[in-house]
Amino acid sequence: MKYQSQSVAKLYFIAAIALFAAQILFGLIIGLQYVMGDFLFPEIPFNVARMVHTNALIVWLLMAFMGAAYYLVPEEAETELFAPWLATLMFWIFLVAAALTVAGYLLVPYATLAELTMNKLLPTMGREFLEQPTITKLGIVIVALAFLFNIGMTILKGRKTVVNLVLLLGLVGLAVFFLFAFYNPTNVVMDKFFWWWTVHLWVEGVWELILGAILAFVLIKTTGVDREVIEKWLYIIIAMTLITGIIGTGHHYFWIGTPEYWQWWGSIFSAMEPIPFFMMTVFAFNMVNKRRREHPNKAAILWALGTAVMAFLGAGVWGFLHTLSPVNYYTHGTQITAAHGHMAFYGAYVMISLTMISYAMPLLRGRNAANPAKSQVVEMWSFWLMTVSIVFITLFLTGAGILQSYLQRMGENPQSFMAVQDQIALFYWLREIAGVVFLIGLLLYIASFFVGQNEPEAAAAD
Amino acid sequence: MAEAFTKSMARNIFYGGSAFFFLLFLALTFDTMGQLPNRDNRAALEGELGPVIAQGKALWENNDCIGCHTLLGEGAYFAPELGNVYKRFGNSTDAIKGFILSRPKDGIPGRRSMPQFNFNDEELTAIAEFLKYVSEINTANWPPNIQG
């Protein structure tokens, strides 16, 4: 750690990991509710547990992105953070707001929460992923603005690198497109159309800029490859991301009441969306092969390579699987979507967050470069357990989705939703077992922070 | 990658490409907004039942129905698609009201169950009218059949 103010990142990373644990716990609850329908009913109905599962995911990824920015921006800009106190203050505001929101979900019925938070004044609640009370959404905007101000001022007074600028562009986009969360007309088609401006343009747009910038930073640091080479790659990758991803929004516009030409635009452009992810895989392996030094943090390099591979599989391949409109006609809103969502989010955003945490945490905890070998071994075990189990979760959900699409939408005698659900229960059970393995991986990951702390840190082989 | 391909060329592709495709996206959006009135069943919203449908949507949102169901394929995959439930229930708002009303408050042992929300008749009507309005949006023939 070169700059004192980078240390604020630690708070963000710790909270991110805690929320990650909460996310997985509630994931297991809803996974079980798929096969034991009355589990925790009516105390924690499915929708409540799902909200905690998805909202905790979004918040912990945002926390991790912010932590990553607070860590890497000073180092890239070669200057202290503009206002470290503001970063700390915003952290606590964000954490308390998130905790209160989750408590609200769990303790009172959602309709009561809507009433308590005066959703009537500016209705924004009750839409997938944007379930947060309006007051929480306003809080997110305030935190995001303060964060952007802090990061922007730091970059302004320091060195302007490509990594910093791409990250900043991603973060500005994140704030701008979140504003569409406040637009909620009664017209369902308009509502959905612009809802995707937050959801798709985040997940398949600006978040990928953030991903690219973080990955480039970690690769510069761990491989010692010339910055010029890495920055050129970064530009090409994010160029392809936005060129394919912006019009790629169209793959969400097939069946919500928009004109039929979106089936062409959406199919063609989203079929190209795997390209930047494929380039990212080639990029990461190339840089690691061309490395000029052996970095002692093997775990961080493993996470970085894992991100590139799994993002390509989950976001790229599994996205492509059902993105062409004639296929999507039968798979839209089935377990195929869930399968893609799980691997894409884990591969792209969970893994890049863990890459950054893996690289930065040892330094934030006062080491020169890396954790002791013993702790890295545990961390790498957690990598494999979580990654392999998400592959199986994805495969089981894909199996469920193929059967569901066939039985409910394609066969001779299409069957009702609930009748079909009964027939694919086996896949849900298998998914739940894979989920338990994932939890074990996560527990090992958390344990890696405590294992072998008294041993000397790992040194580079050469 | 050839030496001739420089970083500034990559940068220009990024800025130029992103700007071009964002503008194209805005143009397509503009065109879509022009075509929506013929597809999105806004006549229902502007008609006599408009305020009832609006109330129905508010109830839909305030009770997080999307947390279990999908609506036009989006939402959670735990409970049936509702974009066409009006048609699935034989084009009957009364059938929708009856179903919601009849949910057991303690659930069904071992099975998924919709909570009992204790809506009054006015609220039930609002939700049913909202679902009827959604079912009459032109969705390019999605879902593939009545099962949703």
Image (spheres, coloured by chain):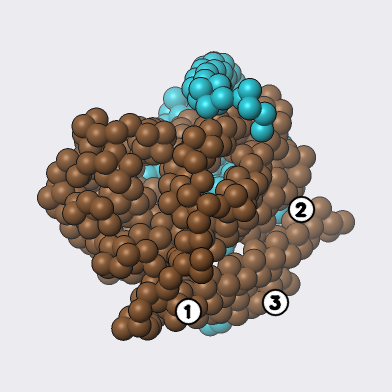
Mark 1–mark 3 CB contact (< 8 Å) = no
Which amino acid, by three-letter code, is at mark 2? Arg
Q: Please indicate whether residue A265 sits to the left or right of residue B118 in the image.
A: right
Chain A tint in image? brown
How packed is label 1: few (under 14 Cα within 10 Å), some, or many (20 or more)?
many
Q: Are marks 1 and 2 on the same chain?
A: yes
Secondary structure category for the residue under label 3: helix
Q: Nearer the viewer, residue A318 or A460?
A: A460
Q: Which chain: cyan?
A: B
Q: Which mark is residue A275?
A: none
Q: Which residue is mark 2?
A: A409
Residue A392 x, y percent position in the rendering: 66, 70
Q: Nearer the viewer, residue A303 or B62?
A: A303
Q: In the rendered image, which quarter is residue A37 located in? A: bottom right
Q: Are marks 2 and 3 on the same chain?
A: yes
Residue A216 x, y percent position in the rendering: 47, 45
How packed is label 3: few (under 14 Cα within 10 Å), some, or many (20 or more)?
some
Q: In the rendered image, which quarter is residue A306 located in? A: bottom right
Question: Could you tell me how far apart the alpha carbons at marks 2 and 3 are, in whole angstroms?
Answer: 20 Å
Q: Which residue is mark 1?
A: A378
Which amino acid, by three-letter code, is at mark 3? Leu
Q: Nearer the viewer, residue A433 or A122?
A: A433
Q: Is residue B73 visible?
A: no
Residue A251 x, y percent position in the rendering: 63, 37
